[in-house]
Image (tube, rainbow, N blue to C red):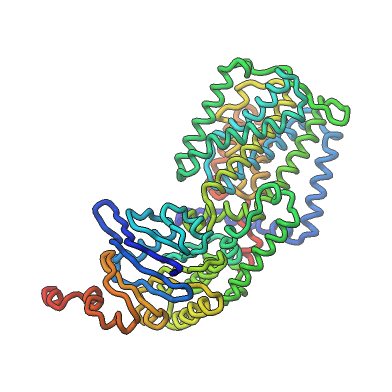
Protein backbone atom coordinates (compact mmCIF):
# COMPACT_ATOMS: atom_id res chain seq x y z
CA UNK A 1 0.00 0.00 0.00
CA UNK A 2 2.70 2.44 1.04
CA UNK A 3 4.52 1.74 -2.19
CA UNK A 4 1.57 2.63 -4.40
CA UNK A 5 1.10 5.85 -2.49
CA UNK A 6 4.65 6.89 -3.07
CA UNK A 7 4.31 6.18 -6.76
CA UNK A 8 0.99 7.97 -7.02
CA UNK A 9 2.73 11.16 -5.95
CA UNK A 10 5.13 10.95 -8.86
CA UNK A 11 2.28 10.81 -11.37
CA UNK A 12 0.70 14.13 -10.48
CA UNK A 13 1.33 16.05 -13.71
CA UNK A 14 -0.02 13.21 -15.81
CA UNK A 15 -2.97 12.69 -13.51
CA UNK A 16 -3.80 16.38 -13.75
CA UNK A 17 -4.42 16.16 -17.48
CA UNK A 18 -6.61 13.08 -17.19
CA UNK A 19 -8.60 14.55 -14.32
CA UNK A 20 -9.20 17.75 -16.27
CA UNK A 21 -10.45 15.72 -19.22
CA UNK A 22 -12.68 13.83 -16.86
CA UNK A 23 -14.23 16.98 -15.44
CA UNK A 24 -14.86 18.16 -18.97
CA UNK A 25 -16.64 14.97 -19.97
CA UNK A 26 -18.71 14.88 -16.81
CA UNK A 27 -20.98 17.14 -18.82
CA UNK A 28 -23.07 14.56 -20.67
CA UNK A 29 -23.58 16.75 -23.76
CA UNK A 30 -19.84 17.04 -24.36
CA UNK A 31 -19.46 13.33 -23.77
CA UNK A 32 -22.13 12.36 -26.30
CA UNK A 33 -20.83 14.91 -28.82
CA UNK A 34 -17.36 13.45 -28.45
CA UNK A 35 -18.54 9.86 -28.79
CA UNK A 36 -20.69 10.83 -31.79
CA UNK A 37 -17.72 12.53 -33.46
CA UNK A 38 -15.50 9.50 -32.89
CA UNK A 39 -18.12 7.14 -34.30
CA UNK A 40 -18.66 9.32 -37.41
CA UNK A 41 -14.90 9.56 -37.96
CA UNK A 42 -14.54 5.81 -37.66
CA UNK A 43 -17.46 5.20 -40.02
CA UNK A 44 -16.03 7.40 -42.81
CA UNK A 45 -12.47 6.28 -42.10
CA UNK A 46 -12.20 3.50 -44.75
CA UNK A 47 -13.06 6.02 -47.54
CA UNK A 48 -10.09 8.18 -46.75
CA UNK A 49 -7.38 5.75 -45.84
CA UNK A 50 -5.13 3.11 -47.31
CA UNK A 51 -5.72 -0.61 -47.05
CA UNK A 52 -2.80 -0.84 -44.65
CA UNK A 53 -4.26 1.59 -42.11
CA UNK A 54 -7.65 -0.07 -42.45
CA UNK A 55 -5.98 -3.35 -41.62
CA UNK A 56 -4.47 -1.86 -38.48
CA UNK A 57 -7.78 -0.36 -37.40
CA UNK A 58 -9.53 -3.69 -37.99
CA UNK A 59 -6.92 -5.30 -35.81
CA UNK A 60 -7.62 -2.66 -33.16
CA UNK A 61 -11.35 -3.41 -33.15
CA UNK A 62 -10.56 -7.09 -32.96
CA UNK A 63 -8.35 -6.43 -29.94
CA UNK A 64 -11.13 -4.42 -28.29
CA UNK A 65 -13.57 -7.35 -28.58
CA UNK A 66 -11.07 -9.90 -27.28
CA UNK A 67 -9.75 -7.72 -24.49
CA UNK A 68 -13.22 -6.74 -23.28
CA UNK A 69 -13.95 -10.46 -23.03
CA UNK A 70 -10.76 -11.02 -21.09
CA UNK A 71 -11.64 -8.00 -18.98
CA UNK A 72 -14.79 -9.74 -17.75
CA UNK A 73 -12.61 -12.53 -16.36
CA UNK A 74 -9.59 -10.55 -15.21
CA UNK A 75 -11.07 -7.14 -14.52
CA UNK A 76 -14.59 -7.86 -13.33
CA UNK A 77 -14.12 -11.18 -11.58
CA UNK A 78 -10.46 -10.69 -10.64
CA UNK A 79 -9.30 -14.05 -12.02
CA UNK A 80 -5.83 -14.00 -13.53
CA UNK A 81 -6.10 -15.71 -16.90
CA UNK A 82 -2.91 -16.52 -18.78
CA UNK A 83 -4.33 -18.71 -21.50
CA UNK A 84 -7.02 -16.60 -23.09
CA UNK A 85 -5.72 -17.23 -26.60
CA UNK A 86 -6.95 -20.82 -26.15
CA UNK A 87 -10.58 -19.68 -26.03
CA UNK A 88 -9.99 -17.49 -29.00
CA UNK A 89 -8.54 -20.59 -30.71
CA UNK A 90 -11.58 -22.68 -29.74
CA UNK A 91 -13.81 -20.17 -31.55
CA UNK A 92 -11.56 -19.84 -34.57
CA UNK A 93 -11.14 -23.59 -35.01
CA UNK A 94 -14.80 -24.37 -34.45
CA UNK A 95 -15.69 -22.01 -37.26
CA UNK A 96 -12.70 -23.16 -39.29
CA UNK A 97 -13.54 -26.85 -39.10
CA UNK A 98 -17.29 -26.42 -39.61
CA UNK A 99 -16.71 -24.09 -42.52
CA UNK A 100 -13.77 -25.64 -44.41
CA UNK A 101 -14.39 -29.32 -43.63
CA UNK A 102 -18.18 -29.44 -43.43
CA UNK A 103 -18.95 -26.44 -45.61
CA UNK A 104 -21.25 -24.82 -43.10
CA UNK A 105 -22.44 -21.23 -43.53
CA UNK A 106 -20.26 -18.88 -41.47
CA UNK A 107 -23.13 -17.33 -39.50
CA UNK A 108 -24.37 -20.75 -38.44
CA UNK A 109 -20.97 -21.64 -37.01
CA UNK A 110 -21.08 -18.83 -34.43
CA UNK A 111 -23.55 -20.54 -32.04
CA UNK A 112 -21.40 -23.67 -32.26
CA UNK A 113 -18.30 -21.73 -31.41
CA UNK A 114 -20.04 -20.14 -28.43
CA UNK A 115 -21.19 -23.56 -27.21
CA UNK A 116 -17.67 -24.95 -27.66
CA UNK A 117 -16.22 -22.06 -25.63
CA UNK A 118 -18.82 -22.52 -22.89
CA UNK A 119 -17.99 -26.22 -22.67
CA UNK A 120 -14.25 -25.49 -22.60
CA UNK A 121 -14.83 -22.75 -20.02
CA UNK A 122 -16.86 -25.10 -17.83
CA UNK A 123 -14.28 -27.86 -18.15
CA UNK A 124 -11.48 -25.55 -17.05
CA UNK A 125 -13.43 -23.34 -14.69
CA UNK A 126 -15.61 -25.72 -12.69
CA UNK A 127 -12.79 -27.64 -11.02
CA UNK A 128 -10.39 -24.71 -10.62
CA UNK A 129 -12.44 -21.65 -9.71
CA UNK A 130 -12.66 -22.74 -6.09
CA UNK A 131 -8.95 -22.15 -5.88
CA UNK A 132 -7.68 -18.76 -4.88
CA UNK A 133 -5.40 -16.53 -6.88
CA UNK A 134 -2.27 -17.89 -8.42
CA UNK A 135 -3.34 -21.48 -8.93
CA UNK A 136 -5.84 -20.42 -11.54
CA UNK A 137 -3.14 -18.53 -13.43
CA UNK A 138 -1.09 -21.72 -13.65
CA UNK A 139 -4.05 -23.82 -14.74
CA UNK A 140 -5.05 -21.35 -17.46
CA UNK A 141 -1.46 -21.08 -18.62
CA UNK A 142 -1.35 -24.86 -18.92
CA UNK A 143 -4.69 -24.97 -20.69
CA UNK A 144 -3.48 -22.43 -23.24
CA UNK A 145 -0.46 -24.51 -24.11
CA UNK A 146 -2.38 -27.80 -24.13
CA UNK A 147 -4.92 -26.34 -26.54
CA UNK A 148 -2.24 -25.05 -28.87
CA UNK A 149 -0.35 -28.34 -28.85
CA UNK A 150 -3.56 -30.29 -29.38
CA UNK A 151 -4.60 -28.32 -32.44
CA UNK A 152 -1.07 -28.64 -33.72
CA UNK A 153 -1.20 -32.41 -33.55
CA UNK A 154 -4.77 -33.28 -34.52
CA UNK A 155 -5.69 -34.18 -38.09
CA UNK A 156 -9.01 -32.39 -38.11
CA UNK A 157 -7.31 -29.10 -37.22
CA UNK A 158 -4.78 -29.47 -40.01
CA UNK A 159 -1.80 -29.95 -37.72
CA UNK A 160 0.97 -27.40 -37.85
CA UNK A 161 -0.11 -26.14 -41.27
CA UNK A 162 -3.56 -25.31 -40.00
CA UNK A 163 -6.82 -24.95 -41.88
CA UNK A 164 -7.27 -23.29 -45.23
CA UNK A 165 -10.29 -22.51 -47.33
CA UNK A 166 -12.53 -21.12 -44.60
CA UNK A 167 -15.53 -19.64 -46.36
CA UNK A 168 -16.11 -15.92 -46.50
CA UNK A 169 -19.26 -14.77 -44.76
CA UNK A 170 -22.11 -13.61 -46.96
CA UNK A 171 -24.27 -10.77 -45.71
CA UNK A 172 -27.33 -9.51 -47.65
CA UNK A 173 -26.02 -11.21 -50.78
CA UNK A 174 -22.60 -9.55 -50.55
CA UNK A 175 -19.59 -11.75 -49.96
CA UNK A 176 -17.43 -10.07 -47.34
CA UNK A 177 -13.99 -10.15 -48.89
CA UNK A 178 -12.73 -6.56 -48.81
CA UNK A 179 -10.76 -5.19 -45.90
CA UNK A 180 -13.35 -2.42 -45.55
CA UNK A 181 -16.04 -5.07 -45.07
CA UNK A 182 -14.13 -6.57 -42.20
CA UNK A 183 -13.34 -3.14 -40.88
CA UNK A 184 -17.07 -2.48 -40.48
CA UNK A 185 -17.78 -5.95 -39.20
CA UNK A 186 -15.23 -5.70 -36.41
CA UNK A 187 -16.30 -2.12 -35.75
CA UNK A 188 -19.85 -3.31 -35.10
CA UNK A 189 -18.54 -6.21 -32.99
CA UNK A 190 -16.45 -3.81 -30.90
CA UNK A 191 -19.47 -1.57 -30.29
CA UNK A 192 -21.51 -4.63 -29.31
CA UNK A 193 -18.76 -5.78 -26.94
CA UNK A 194 -18.63 -2.33 -25.31
CA UNK A 195 -22.40 -2.30 -25.00
CA UNK A 196 -22.59 -5.76 -23.41
CA UNK A 197 -19.69 -4.93 -21.09
CA UNK A 198 -21.46 -1.81 -19.84
CA UNK A 199 -24.72 -3.62 -19.30
CA UNK A 200 -22.98 -6.37 -17.36
CA UNK A 201 -20.99 -3.91 -15.30
CA UNK A 202 -24.03 -1.95 -14.12
CA UNK A 203 -26.02 -4.93 -13.03
CA UNK A 204 -26.60 -7.37 -10.25
CA UNK A 205 -24.04 -9.70 -11.82
CA UNK A 206 -21.44 -7.00 -12.33
CA UNK A 207 -21.77 -5.87 -8.75
CA UNK A 208 -21.51 -9.45 -7.48
CA UNK A 209 -18.15 -9.77 -9.24
CA UNK A 210 -17.00 -6.56 -7.66
CA UNK A 211 -18.09 -7.68 -4.19
CA UNK A 212 -16.20 -10.95 -4.61
CA UNK A 213 -13.11 -9.12 -5.78
CA UNK A 214 -13.23 -6.83 -2.77
CA UNK A 215 -13.91 -9.43 -0.09
CA UNK A 216 -14.76 -13.01 -0.94
CA UNK A 217 -15.97 -13.99 2.54
CA UNK A 218 -18.11 -10.92 3.04
CA UNK A 219 -19.66 -11.52 -0.37
CA UNK A 220 -20.50 -15.10 0.61
CA UNK A 221 -21.98 -13.86 3.88
CA UNK A 222 -24.21 -11.52 1.86
CA UNK A 223 -25.63 -14.51 0.04
CA UNK A 224 -23.55 -14.45 -3.12
CA UNK A 225 -22.53 -17.79 -4.56
CA UNK A 226 -18.86 -17.09 -5.14
CA UNK A 227 -18.04 -20.14 -7.26
CA UNK A 228 -21.06 -19.80 -9.56
CA UNK A 229 -20.51 -16.06 -10.05
CA UNK A 230 -16.90 -16.68 -11.03
CA UNK A 231 -17.91 -19.46 -13.36
CA UNK A 232 -20.36 -17.09 -15.07
CA UNK A 233 -17.59 -14.55 -15.60
CA UNK A 234 -15.29 -17.23 -16.92
CA UNK A 235 -17.86 -18.57 -19.36
CA UNK A 236 -19.09 -15.19 -20.59
CA UNK A 237 -15.51 -14.01 -21.10
CA UNK A 238 -14.65 -17.23 -22.95
CA UNK A 239 -17.67 -16.79 -25.21
CA UNK A 240 -16.51 -13.26 -26.13
CA UNK A 241 -13.13 -14.68 -27.12
CA UNK A 242 -14.73 -17.46 -29.14
CA UNK A 243 -16.93 -15.07 -31.14
CA UNK A 244 -13.90 -12.91 -31.88
CA UNK A 245 -12.08 -16.09 -32.93
CA UNK A 246 -14.88 -17.05 -35.35
CA UNK A 247 -14.73 -13.68 -37.08
CA UNK A 248 -10.95 -13.83 -37.08
CA UNK A 249 -11.10 -17.17 -38.91
CA UNK A 250 -13.54 -15.76 -41.45
CA UNK A 251 -11.35 -12.75 -42.10
CA UNK A 252 -8.12 -14.72 -42.50
CA UNK A 253 -9.69 -17.70 -44.34
CA UNK A 254 -6.68 -19.64 -43.09
CA UNK A 255 -5.65 -20.26 -39.49
CA UNK A 256 -2.73 -22.06 -37.96
CA UNK A 257 -1.58 -22.81 -34.40
CA UNK A 258 0.86 -19.91 -34.64
CA UNK A 259 -2.01 -17.45 -34.25
CA UNK A 260 -2.75 -18.72 -30.75
CA UNK A 261 0.56 -18.63 -28.96
CA UNK A 262 1.21 -17.72 -25.35
CA UNK A 263 2.49 -14.33 -26.54
CA UNK A 264 -1.03 -13.51 -27.78
CA UNK A 265 -2.52 -14.27 -24.38
CA UNK A 266 0.11 -11.98 -22.91
CA UNK A 267 -0.63 -9.17 -25.36
CA UNK A 268 -4.36 -9.35 -24.58
CA UNK A 269 -3.68 -9.36 -20.87
CA UNK A 270 -1.27 -6.46 -21.28
CA UNK A 271 -3.86 -4.31 -23.04
CA UNK A 272 -6.31 -4.96 -20.18
CA UNK A 273 -3.84 -4.27 -17.39
CA UNK A 274 -2.28 -1.28 -19.12
CA UNK A 275 -5.55 0.55 -19.63
CA UNK A 276 -7.00 -0.38 -16.28
CA UNK A 277 -8.62 -3.66 -15.29
CA UNK A 278 -12.37 -3.58 -15.01
CA UNK A 279 -12.69 -0.17 -16.66
CA UNK A 280 -14.18 -0.28 -20.15
CA UNK A 281 -12.69 2.99 -21.50
CA UNK A 282 -9.41 1.92 -19.92
CA UNK A 283 -9.40 -1.40 -21.75
CA UNK A 284 -10.19 0.35 -25.05
CA UNK A 285 -7.33 2.76 -24.40
CA UNK A 286 -5.04 -0.17 -23.56
CA UNK A 287 -5.94 -1.80 -26.89
CA UNK A 288 -5.24 1.45 -28.74
CA UNK A 289 -1.79 1.63 -27.18
CA UNK A 290 -0.89 -2.03 -27.67
CA UNK A 291 -2.03 -2.06 -31.30
CA UNK A 292 -1.10 1.41 -32.46
CA UNK A 293 2.20 2.21 -30.75
CA UNK A 294 4.20 -0.49 -32.59
CA UNK A 295 2.65 0.69 -35.89
CA UNK A 296 3.16 4.40 -35.32
CA UNK A 297 6.73 3.72 -34.24
CA UNK A 298 7.47 1.74 -37.42
CA UNK A 299 9.57 4.65 -38.72
CA UNK A 300 12.03 4.21 -35.89
CA UNK A 301 13.14 0.93 -37.38
CA UNK A 302 14.55 -2.04 -35.53
CA UNK A 303 14.36 -0.38 -32.14
CA UNK A 304 10.61 0.12 -32.16
CA UNK A 305 9.78 -2.90 -30.02
CA UNK A 306 12.45 -1.89 -27.55
CA UNK A 307 10.91 1.55 -27.27
CA UNK A 308 7.46 -0.03 -27.00
CA UNK A 309 8.66 -2.20 -24.13
CA UNK A 310 10.28 0.70 -22.34
CA UNK A 311 7.11 2.75 -22.69
CA UNK A 312 5.03 -0.07 -21.18
CA UNK A 313 7.47 -0.35 -18.32
CA UNK A 314 7.25 3.37 -17.58
CA UNK A 315 3.46 3.38 -17.67
CA UNK A 316 3.27 0.40 -15.33
CA UNK A 317 5.77 1.94 -12.92
CA UNK A 318 3.83 5.17 -12.66
CA UNK A 319 0.31 3.81 -12.99
CA UNK A 320 0.24 0.27 -11.59
CA UNK A 321 -3.57 0.45 -11.45
CA UNK A 322 -3.74 1.20 -15.18
CA UNK A 323 -3.87 4.46 -17.10
CA UNK A 324 -7.56 5.08 -16.73
CA UNK A 325 -8.39 6.78 -13.41
CA UNK A 326 -10.63 5.15 -10.81
CA UNK A 327 -14.28 6.14 -10.63
CA UNK A 328 -13.78 9.89 -10.48
CA UNK A 329 -17.49 10.75 -10.64
CA UNK A 330 -18.24 9.29 -7.23
CA UNK A 331 -15.02 9.99 -5.38
CA UNK A 332 -15.30 13.67 -6.36
CA UNK A 333 -18.38 13.88 -4.17
CA UNK A 334 -16.20 13.22 -1.19
CA UNK B 1 -40.25 -24.54 18.24
CA UNK B 2 -37.19 -22.39 18.62
CA UNK B 3 -35.98 -20.39 15.60
CA UNK B 4 -32.45 -21.64 16.09
CA UNK B 5 -31.48 -24.78 17.91
CA UNK B 6 -27.90 -25.82 18.54
CA UNK B 7 -27.33 -29.32 19.87
CA UNK B 8 -23.95 -30.57 21.10
CA UNK B 9 -22.06 -28.37 18.67
CA UNK B 10 -18.38 -29.28 18.67
CA UNK B 11 -15.54 -27.70 16.71
CA UNK B 12 -11.98 -28.98 16.88
CA UNK B 13 -8.86 -27.63 15.25
CA UNK B 14 -6.44 -30.52 15.54
CA UNK B 15 -6.18 -31.17 19.26
CA UNK B 16 -7.72 -27.86 20.27
CA UNK B 17 -11.37 -27.94 21.12
CA UNK B 18 -12.73 -24.50 20.28
CA UNK B 19 -16.36 -25.35 20.91
CA UNK B 20 -17.30 -28.31 23.07
CA UNK B 21 -20.79 -29.84 23.04
CA UNK B 22 -22.53 -26.51 23.11
CA UNK B 23 -26.32 -26.55 23.18
CA UNK B 24 -28.60 -23.57 23.14
CA UNK B 25 -31.90 -22.38 21.77
CA UNK B 26 -32.95 -19.04 20.40
CA UNK B 27 -36.65 -18.29 20.42
CA UNK B 28 -38.25 -16.26 17.66
CA UNK B 29 -38.47 -12.56 18.45
CA UNK B 30 -35.93 -12.63 21.25
CA UNK B 31 -32.64 -10.83 21.85
CA UNK B 32 -29.95 -13.25 23.02
CA UNK B 33 -26.29 -12.72 23.80
CA UNK B 34 -23.31 -14.99 23.86
CA UNK B 35 -20.53 -13.82 26.15
CA UNK B 36 -17.29 -15.20 27.40
CA UNK B 37 -13.66 -14.23 27.98
CA UNK B 38 -11.29 -13.69 25.05
CA UNK B 39 -10.70 -16.87 23.11
CA UNK B 40 -13.71 -18.63 24.61
CA UNK B 41 -14.91 -19.68 21.14
CA UNK B 42 -17.69 -17.18 20.58
CA UNK B 43 -16.82 -16.20 17.03
CA UNK B 44 -16.22 -19.89 16.26
CA UNK B 45 -19.86 -20.53 17.10
CA UNK B 46 -20.90 -17.82 14.63
CA UNK B 47 -18.59 -19.15 11.96
CA UNK B 48 -20.13 -22.60 12.35
CA UNK B 49 -23.64 -21.22 12.18
CA UNK B 50 -22.95 -19.23 9.02
CA UNK B 51 -21.13 -22.02 7.23
CA UNK B 52 -17.61 -20.60 7.32
CA UNK B 53 -16.37 -23.41 9.58
CA UNK B 54 -17.43 -27.02 9.38
CA UNK B 55 -18.36 -28.26 12.86
CA UNK B 56 -16.71 -31.50 13.95
CA UNK B 57 -19.94 -32.69 15.49
CA UNK B 58 -23.39 -31.76 16.66
CA UNK B 59 -26.45 -30.38 14.98
CA UNK B 60 -27.68 -26.88 14.15
CA UNK B 61 -31.30 -26.39 13.19
CA UNK B 62 -32.62 -23.14 11.76
CA UNK B 63 -36.40 -23.18 11.45
CA UNK B 64 -36.16 -26.93 11.69
CA UNK B 65 -33.66 -27.24 8.82
CA UNK B 66 -30.12 -28.41 9.39
CA UNK B 67 -27.32 -25.93 8.73
CA UNK B 68 -24.56 -28.53 8.79
CA UNK B 69 -22.58 -28.71 5.52
CA UNK B 70 -24.43 -25.78 4.00
CA UNK B 71 -22.51 -23.10 2.12
CA UNK B 72 -22.51 -19.57 3.60
CA UNK B 73 -24.55 -18.06 0.76
CA UNK B 74 -27.29 -20.67 1.18
CA UNK B 75 -27.48 -20.01 4.91
CA UNK B 76 -27.88 -16.31 4.19
CA UNK B 77 -30.59 -17.21 1.69
CA UNK B 78 -32.38 -19.23 4.41
CA UNK B 79 -32.66 -16.04 6.44
CA UNK B 80 -29.64 -15.77 8.69
CA UNK B 81 -27.45 -12.69 8.27
CA UNK B 82 -24.26 -11.77 10.08
CA UNK B 83 -21.89 -8.91 10.68
CA UNK B 84 -18.17 -9.34 11.21
CA UNK B 85 -16.05 -8.62 14.26
CA UNK B 86 -13.54 -6.72 12.16
CA UNK B 87 -15.42 -4.71 9.60
CA UNK B 88 -15.64 -6.46 6.27
CA UNK B 89 -17.13 -3.79 4.06
CA UNK B 90 -16.47 -3.60 0.32
CA UNK B 91 -14.09 -0.71 0.90
CA UNK B 92 -13.74 0.75 -2.56
CA UNK B 93 -17.46 0.78 -3.27
CA UNK B 94 -20.11 3.29 -2.28
CA UNK B 95 -22.28 2.91 0.79
CA UNK B 96 -25.33 2.25 -1.36
CA UNK B 97 -23.55 -0.41 -3.42
CA UNK B 98 -22.40 -2.06 -0.21
CA UNK B 99 -25.94 -2.35 1.06
CA UNK B 100 -27.27 -3.43 -2.34
CA UNK B 101 -25.11 -6.56 -1.99
CA UNK B 102 -27.56 -7.85 0.60
CA UNK B 103 -30.32 -8.05 -2.00
CA UNK B 104 -28.30 -10.32 -4.28
CA UNK B 105 -29.73 -13.52 -2.86
CA UNK B 106 -33.30 -12.18 -3.10
CA UNK B 107 -33.05 -11.36 -6.82
CA UNK B 108 -32.23 -13.38 -9.91
CA UNK B 109 -31.43 -11.40 -13.11
CA UNK B 110 -28.94 -13.37 -15.24
CA UNK B 111 -26.94 -12.77 -18.42
CA UNK B 112 -29.64 -12.41 -21.08
CA UNK B 113 -32.07 -10.29 -19.09
CA UNK B 114 -29.16 -8.10 -18.01
CA UNK B 115 -27.85 -7.51 -21.53
CA UNK B 116 -31.33 -6.95 -22.95
CA UNK B 117 -32.27 -4.88 -19.89
CA UNK B 118 -35.77 -6.32 -19.84
CA UNK B 119 -38.55 -4.69 -17.92
CA UNK B 120 -38.33 -7.33 -15.23
CA UNK B 121 -34.63 -6.66 -14.81
CA UNK B 122 -35.20 -2.90 -14.52
CA UNK B 123 -37.92 -3.46 -11.96
CA UNK B 124 -35.59 -5.72 -10.02
CA UNK B 125 -32.77 -3.14 -10.11
CA UNK B 126 -35.14 -0.54 -8.75
CA UNK B 127 -36.29 -2.90 -6.04
CA UNK B 128 -32.68 -3.61 -5.03
CA UNK B 129 -32.04 0.12 -4.79
CA UNK B 130 -35.25 0.81 -2.88
CA UNK B 131 -34.61 -1.89 -0.27
CA UNK B 132 -31.01 -0.75 0.15
CA UNK B 133 -32.10 2.85 0.64
CA UNK B 134 -34.76 1.83 3.11
CA UNK B 135 -32.19 -0.12 5.14
CA UNK B 136 -29.81 2.84 5.05
CA UNK B 137 -32.56 5.12 6.26
CA UNK B 138 -33.29 2.71 9.07
CA UNK B 139 -29.75 2.97 10.41
CA UNK B 140 -29.59 6.70 9.66
CA UNK B 141 -27.05 6.63 6.83
CA UNK B 142 -29.18 7.52 3.80
CA UNK B 143 -27.61 10.97 3.41
CA UNK B 144 -24.18 9.38 2.98
CA UNK B 145 -25.16 6.79 0.41
CA UNK B 146 -22.75 8.04 -2.27
CA UNK B 147 -19.68 8.03 -0.03
CA UNK B 148 -16.95 5.50 -0.67
CA UNK B 149 -17.12 3.10 2.27
CA UNK B 150 -13.46 3.36 3.28
CA UNK B 151 -13.72 7.15 3.66
CA UNK B 152 -16.36 6.96 6.40
CA UNK B 153 -15.55 7.24 10.11
CA UNK B 154 -15.52 3.94 11.97
CA UNK B 155 -18.90 4.32 13.61
CA UNK B 156 -20.55 5.02 10.26
CA UNK B 157 -18.86 2.00 8.70
CA UNK B 158 -20.45 -0.12 11.44
CA UNK B 159 -23.85 1.27 10.51
CA UNK B 160 -23.28 0.39 6.87
CA UNK B 161 -22.53 -3.16 7.91
CA UNK B 162 -25.77 -3.41 9.84
CA UNK B 163 -27.72 -1.98 6.93
CA UNK B 164 -26.04 -4.46 4.62
CA UNK B 165 -27.03 -7.36 6.86
CA UNK B 166 -30.59 -6.04 7.09
CA UNK B 167 -30.81 -5.85 3.30
CA UNK B 168 -30.57 -9.64 3.10
CA UNK B 169 -33.99 -9.59 4.81
CA UNK B 170 -33.04 -12.01 7.57
CA UNK B 171 -35.15 -13.66 10.24
CA UNK B 172 -32.16 -13.99 12.52
CA UNK B 173 -29.35 -11.46 12.74
CA UNK B 174 -25.99 -12.46 14.19
CA UNK B 175 -23.98 -9.48 15.43
CA UNK B 176 -20.33 -10.17 16.16
CA UNK B 177 -19.17 -7.58 18.70
CA UNK B 178 -21.31 -4.75 17.34
CA UNK B 179 -20.10 -2.28 19.96
CA UNK B 180 -16.36 -2.79 19.39
CA UNK B 181 -14.71 0.55 18.76
CA UNK B 182 -17.82 2.65 19.39
CA UNK B 183 -17.92 5.54 21.86
CA UNK B 184 -20.48 5.69 24.66
CA UNK B 185 -22.87 7.85 22.63
CA UNK B 186 -22.76 5.45 19.73
CA UNK B 187 -23.24 2.53 22.10
CA UNK B 188 -26.40 4.07 23.52
CA UNK B 189 -27.74 4.48 20.00
CA UNK B 190 -26.72 0.90 19.19
CA UNK B 191 -28.87 -0.40 22.04
CA UNK B 192 -31.83 1.52 20.64
CA UNK B 193 -31.09 0.26 17.16
CA UNK B 194 -30.92 -3.38 18.26
CA UNK B 195 -34.30 -3.00 19.97
CA UNK B 196 -35.75 -1.27 16.91
CA UNK B 197 -34.51 -4.04 14.62
CA UNK B 198 -36.33 -6.55 16.76
CA UNK B 199 -39.50 -4.55 17.39
CA UNK B 200 -40.02 -2.84 14.03
CA UNK B 201 -38.59 -5.43 11.68
CA UNK B 202 -39.44 -8.51 13.69
CA UNK B 203 -35.89 -9.88 13.44
CA UNK B 204 -34.50 -12.13 16.14
CA UNK B 205 -31.10 -11.01 17.42
CA UNK B 206 -28.17 -13.09 18.59
CA UNK B 207 -25.07 -11.15 19.54
CA UNK B 208 -21.57 -11.65 20.79
CA UNK B 209 -20.26 -8.83 22.88
CA UNK B 210 -17.47 -7.85 25.21
CA UNK B 211 -19.14 -4.74 26.55
CA UNK B 212 -20.97 -6.08 29.63
CA UNK B 213 -22.97 -2.94 30.17
CA UNK B 214 -24.45 -3.20 26.70
CA UNK B 215 -25.11 -6.93 26.95
CA UNK B 216 -26.84 -6.62 30.31
CA UNK B 217 -29.04 -3.78 29.07
CA UNK B 218 -30.11 -5.17 25.75
CA UNK B 219 -30.42 -8.94 26.04
CA UNK B 220 -33.24 -10.85 27.62
CA UNK B 221 -31.15 -13.94 28.09
CA UNK B 222 -27.42 -14.48 28.14
CA UNK B 223 -25.33 -17.57 27.41
CA UNK B 224 -21.84 -17.65 28.90
CA UNK B 225 -19.13 -19.88 27.44
CA UNK B 226 -15.57 -20.46 28.49
CA UNK B 227 -13.10 -22.72 26.67
CA UNK B 228 -15.93 -23.65 24.32
CA UNK B 229 -18.14 -24.99 27.11
CA UNK B 230 -21.37 -23.38 28.20
CA UNK B 231 -20.97 -22.49 31.85
CA UNK B 232 -24.12 -20.49 32.49
CA UNK B 233 -27.32 -19.15 31.00
CA UNK B 234 -30.03 -16.88 32.27
CA UNK B 235 -31.03 -13.25 32.72
CA UNK B 236 -28.45 -10.54 33.26
CA UNK B 237 -28.93 -10.73 37.02
CA UNK B 238 -28.65 -14.51 37.16
CA UNK B 239 -25.50 -14.52 35.09
CA UNK B 240 -23.90 -11.77 37.12
CA UNK B 241 -24.50 -13.68 40.33
CA UNK B 242 -23.25 -16.99 38.98
CA UNK B 243 -19.94 -17.86 40.68
CA UNK B 244 -18.67 -19.81 37.66
CA UNK B 245 -19.07 -16.75 35.46
CA UNK B 246 -17.25 -14.55 37.93
CA UNK B 247 -14.51 -17.15 38.07
CA UNK B 248 -14.20 -17.34 34.29
CA UNK B 249 -13.86 -13.60 33.97
CA UNK B 250 -11.83 -12.74 37.07
CA UNK B 251 -10.13 -16.02 37.91
CA UNK B 252 -10.29 -17.92 41.20
CA UNK B 253 -9.20 -16.14 44.31
CA UNK B 254 -6.19 -18.34 44.97
CA UNK B 255 -5.06 -17.88 41.39
CA UNK B 256 -5.08 -14.16 41.95
CA UNK B 257 -2.82 -14.58 44.91
CA UNK B 258 -0.29 -16.63 43.02
CA UNK B 259 -0.31 -14.17 40.13
- Please state if A14 lies on the left or on the right of B81 as rendered: right
Which residue occupies the foreground of this view, A61 or B142?
Answer: B142
Q: In this view, does A78 lie above or below B83?
A: above
Residue A307 can be seen, yes or no: no
- Please state if A10 lies on the left or on the right of B47 as rendered: right
Farthest residue to the right: give it.
A173
**Quarter of the image where one finds residue B17:** bottom left
Identity of the residue drawn at 79% across and 52% down: A34
The x, y position of residue A12, in whole percent, is: 58, 57
The x, y position of residue B35, in whole percent, is: 33, 72
Identity of the residue drawn at 68% across and 40% down: A288
The x, y position of residue A53, in whole percent, is: 76, 32
Which residue occupies the foreground of this view, A164 or A43?
Answer: A164
Which residue occupies the foreground of this view, A41 or A263?
Answer: A263
Q: Count the marks: how many?
A: 0
Identity of the residue drawn at 87% across and 27% down: A174
Residue B75 can be seen, yes or no: yes
- Please state if B93 lies on the left or on the right of B3 as rendered: right
Identity of the residue drawn at 55% across and 50% down: A321
Query: What quarter of the picture does the C terminus of chain A occupy?
Result: bottom right
The x, y position of residue B136, in whole percent, is: 59, 72
Q: In this view, does A327 lie above or below A69?
A: below
Amino acid sequence: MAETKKKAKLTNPFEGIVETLFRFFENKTYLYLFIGAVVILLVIFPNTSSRFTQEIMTNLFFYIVVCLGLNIIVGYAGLLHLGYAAFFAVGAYTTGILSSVFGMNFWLTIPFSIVAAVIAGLAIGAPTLRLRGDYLAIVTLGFGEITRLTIRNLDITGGAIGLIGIQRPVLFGITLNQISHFYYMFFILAILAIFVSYRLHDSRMGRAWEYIREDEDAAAAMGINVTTSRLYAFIIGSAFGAVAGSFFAAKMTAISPDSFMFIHSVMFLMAVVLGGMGKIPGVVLGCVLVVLIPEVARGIGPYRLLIFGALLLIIMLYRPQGIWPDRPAISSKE
Amino acid sequence: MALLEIKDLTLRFGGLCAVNELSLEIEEGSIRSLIGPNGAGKTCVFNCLTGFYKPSGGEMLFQGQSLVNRKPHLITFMGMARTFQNLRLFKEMTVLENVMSGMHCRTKAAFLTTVLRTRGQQREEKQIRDVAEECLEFVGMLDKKHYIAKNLPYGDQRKVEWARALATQPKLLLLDEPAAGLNSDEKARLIQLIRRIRDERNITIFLIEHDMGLVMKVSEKIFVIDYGVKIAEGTAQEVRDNPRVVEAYLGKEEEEETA
